[in-house]
Amino acid sequence: MTHKTRQPNPMRRFSFPAANVWLTALLGFALCGIAARGAEPIRALLVAGGCCHDYQAQKKILTEGISARANVTWTIVHEGGDTREYMVSIYKQPDWARGYDVVVHDECFGFVTNVAFVEQITQAHSNGVPAVLLHCSTHSYRMSTTDEWRKLLGVSSYQHEKLRSFQVVNLKPEHPIMQGFPAKWDDTDDELYEIKKLWPNCVPLGKGVSVEKTEHVCIWANTYGKARVFGTSLGHRNETVQDPVYLDLVTRGLLWTCNKLDDNGKPKPGYGSK
Ligand SMILES: [Zn+2]
């Protein structure tokens, strides 16, 4: 009778069950990493400044109001005093939007005409950085000969009706951005921007109706190059900007541009308020 001494097999150290445990652990770490990345805040850049509005207050109202509703962190560039001709410094840098998930334009520089400058702004969005355009950004760069800013907006507008109250009508209550927006909303003392043209990709979401029954689209969604765009011409006074209806709307618009809004108009998991 022979006895075989059972020698430990060095390969057993890497036997299937052990490897499976390690594989499971690695997979777990990987999934945790993906989940953590998914919950990282949206990095937003707010550009504010220029003529005719209280940007000192509105930049605070907007950033605090949106971050109370969604997982968003902010970099704020507020320049230009109350001028109409100022060229915001960050736009002069090539690839100026690198590192941001979305840019919120709340500037009012209607008399800047430099085509190369304007097209450097729009190029970043054409390359895929989402944009939110608020109130006077609709009239910024309107004197420039290039159409790129207007294509980014999705609308062409050159003037507005006088400051007064008007009614805003929800045109697409089924759209995620407009879910939760009233069927009709009374906007107290605001400016109804006169829309001369809707560009082909523009989807009207809301219209303003004046007491004389003039009507203009005042809330819309757009696509520009690779980017989603949300725009509203509403928001002249602080009272409008700080209205929960307005802040809810802009928050949904911002999340939608980043593809972080679900079909029911709610933030996707990880992108609600923290
Ligand atoms: Zn205004």
Image (cartoon, rainbow, N blue to C red):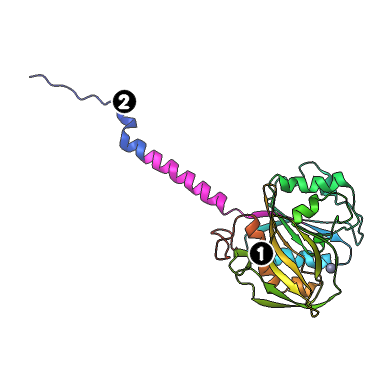
Which residue type does callout 2 highlight? Pro
Q: Nearer the viewer, residue 45 or 136?
A: 136
Q: Residue at x 42, y 43 (%)?
A: 25
Q: Nearer the viewer, residue 57 or 259?
A: 259
Query: Percent position (x, y) of residue 22?
Result: 39, 39
**Main SS, magenta residues:** helix
Which residue type does callout 1 highlight? Thr
The stretch in magenta equals: 21-46
Earlier sequence position, callout 2 versus callout 1: 2
User: Quadrant of residue 205 in the image?
Assistant: bottom right
Q: Is residue 43 magenta?
A: yes
Q: Which residue matches tag 1?
A: 251
Question: Quick check: 144 left or right of 38?
Answer: right
Q: Nearer the viewer, residue 161 or 95?
A: 161
Mark 1, other Cα within 10 Å: few <14 / some 14–19 / many ≥20: many
Mark 2, other Cα within 10 Å: few <14 / some 14–19 / many ≥20: few
Q: Is residue 112 magenta?
A: no
Q: Which residue matches tag 2?
A: 10
User: Quadrant of residue 253 in the image?
Assistant: bottom right
Question: Quick check: 50 left or right of 208?
Answer: right
